[in-house]
Image (tube, rainbow, N blue to C red):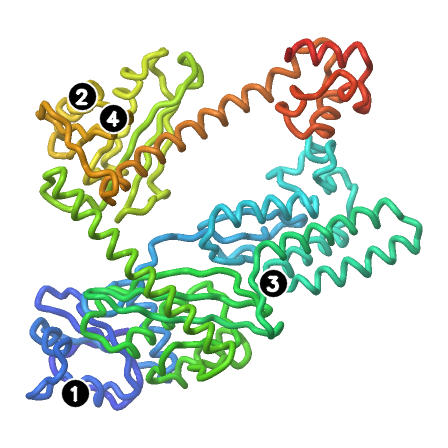
Amino acid sequence: MSTKIKSPDNLPNKPGVYIMKDDSDTIIYIGKAKSLVKRVKSYFREKLDRPKTQILMSHFDSLEYIVTNSEKEALILEATLIKKHRPRYNVQLKDDKRYPYVKITDEEFPRLVITRNVTKNGVYFGPFTDVGSVKQTVKFLKSLFKIRTCRNMNGPCLNSQIDLCYAPCDGKISKEEYGEIINKIDLFFQGKYSTIVNNLKKEMVEAADREEFEKAAVIRDQITSIEEIMEKQFVDFVDDDLDQDVIAIAPSENEVIVIIMPIRNGKIVGRDDFLMSGSQYDSSSEIMFSFIQQYYGYNRHIPKQILLDENIDEKELLEEWLSDLRGNKVTIKVPQKGVKLRLVKMAKKNAEIIKHQKKNMENSLIELKKYLKLEKVPHVIEGYDISNISGQFAVGSKVSFKDGKPYKKRYKHFRMETPGPNDFAMMEELLTRRLKLIDSDPEPDLMVIDGGKGQLGMACGVLEKLNLTHIPVIGIAKEFEEIYLPNTKRPIIIPKNNKALHLLQQVRDESHRFAITYHRKLRSKDISASSLDDIVGIGKKRKIALLKEFGSIENIKKASIEELAKTNGMNQKTAENVYNYYH
């Protein structure tokens, strides 16, 4: 329960959190204190030496405070309230990426799923910054350990029949045996690869001693697969026991780039960058303190050690809080020599590179504004494309770029209803359907259409029909990379080496890639659902046997009659039927 006051004189000499508000009752700053009265009184001196304090107090009207049992509790409450209210004058971690987690579900026979929503049920690993990589890893683990993927266990499915699942739904594996497999996956995401491999080697020897040679061969292949993927994914250091996060910052004018490199079992397992906003009046120590406080406050792995590029104030308070979160001692250090110093320098160098890249991207957006004569810098750019074959499986795509980078959260596919082939009419349908979603999907700062004057004119017609002519739109013709603007006779030529043109090309190419990928997916689904079923002599069992043997419809198409005939359950006549159907 908070208490509202106008003056600091009546504040208690106890730890807690203070909440400053302006005359409209809006929260402008949240802080913690070991002693509320001493800390808050420092804001009311006659001479305020810090620019931030001067600006803050020029907007101050009232104060609320919450007493806590300890300074550590105040630290936790401060982080929670900053995340909830996002006050104007607090340094804030801009983490809007919503990275995915991998979840082991809370079921009798658990599944492995990728999710962006964290609940109380299940075990979570992450967040993971490389979405493509985590999808490949989950796919690899599912096939490697043959765990179930179905939502409802209502009988053996295709996966069990082609040996991709142990079929717990059919009683082919006990709950205990399945639990052992889940434990291996748990160890995998904890980075304990050597433990998994050692356990598997013991199981392989035991299986061989019992003359279960088929099981031993499966385990051998699992060991090989894990060792191969680990060799490809990680960079080794000398100390195998390292469990660290390396953090460095690179300040710019209004925000700070923060780089974090996690190290698990002596291996760099990734790199991520963040922005800290509202930092122009804060010291490096304050910025780093705020980052650690906000970054580790929710669903993060807490390492044994955090390495920084410079010392911070109140380090002991953070160590105590992090140790509680982890369950054992956590230390924060600024290394002076050796491998640890090299790691910090590497992180610092990465932070500086990201800062320069961000500056270059800002410059390219400013250049784009100038060339296209826009009223404001186009922070959000959308690109559109159509993909079909003779009008079949026609799809449209919308991609979004935010501050020059793909913003995949706003990507969208559309199944086209316009009969084809008619790319012009399909594009009109695509733009109309997209722009009718503005209430749920905010309008962009710039729309990019793949095409010349004709396509641009059509796009302008759609905007006019929907009373959205204030949204800038351009066409980019592929042959000479000419840029067409509404109501102009001649195209704009942006120099080939200009970054503004490169950004437009990237938007255009990404919309094409996204459309054609979805189109191919629809085509392949249609083929796999129907083509084998149309062949004389191919029933359910032979269809499964062919897919198990060749892996895909494409590989079946490429197979010879002899190869098809060798498949389990097939004969010469049926093999000829399959071959002739595809040739």
| Residue to which mark 3 is pinned | 191
The quarter of the displayed image where residue 194 is located: bottom right
Q: Which mark is residue 350?
A: none
| Residue to which mark 4 is pinned | 477
Q: For the residues carrying marks 1 and 2, which lies nearer the camera in this image? A: 2
- In this orientation, which residue lies closer to the viewer: 480 or 398? 480
Q: Name the residue at 77% across, 12% down.
A: 574
Work out whether mark 1 precedes mark 2 in sequence or the reverse, and give the earlier one.
1
Q: Name which residue type carries label 4.
A: Ala
- Give how far apart the Cα atoms at labels 3 and 4 are: 49 Å
Q: Name the residue at 17% across, 33% down.
A: 493
Judged from the image, the secondary structure of the residue bearing numbered disc 1 is helix
Q: Quadrant of the N terminus?
A: bottom left
Work out whether mark 2 precedes mark 3 in sequence or the reverse, and give the earlier one.
3
| Percent x, y of residue 510 | 36, 36
Q: Name the residue at 27% across, 38% down.
A: 441
- In this orientation, which residue lies closer to the viewer: 204 or 316? 204
Relative horizontal placement of residue 460, taking residue 397 as reference (left or right): left
Q: Quadrant of the C terminus?
A: top right
Q: Name which residue type carries label 1.
A: Lys
Q: For the residues carrying marks 1 and 3, which lies nearer the camera in this image? A: 3
Judged from the image, the secondary structure of the residue bearing numbered disc 4 is strand
- Give how far apart the Cα atoms at labels 1 and 2 are: 66 Å
Q: For the residues carrying marks 2 and 3, which lies nearer the camera in this image? A: 2
| Residue to which mark 1 is pinned | 41
- Give how far apart the Cα atoms at labels 1 and 3 are: 48 Å
| Residue to which mark 2 is pinned | 453
Query: How many other residues sit within 10 Å of disc 2, few (<14), some (14-19) or many (≥20)?
Result: many
Judged from the image, the secondary structure of the residue bearing numbered disc 2 is helix
Q: Name which residue type carries label 2.
A: Lys
Q: Name the residue at 26% across, 69% down.
A: 251
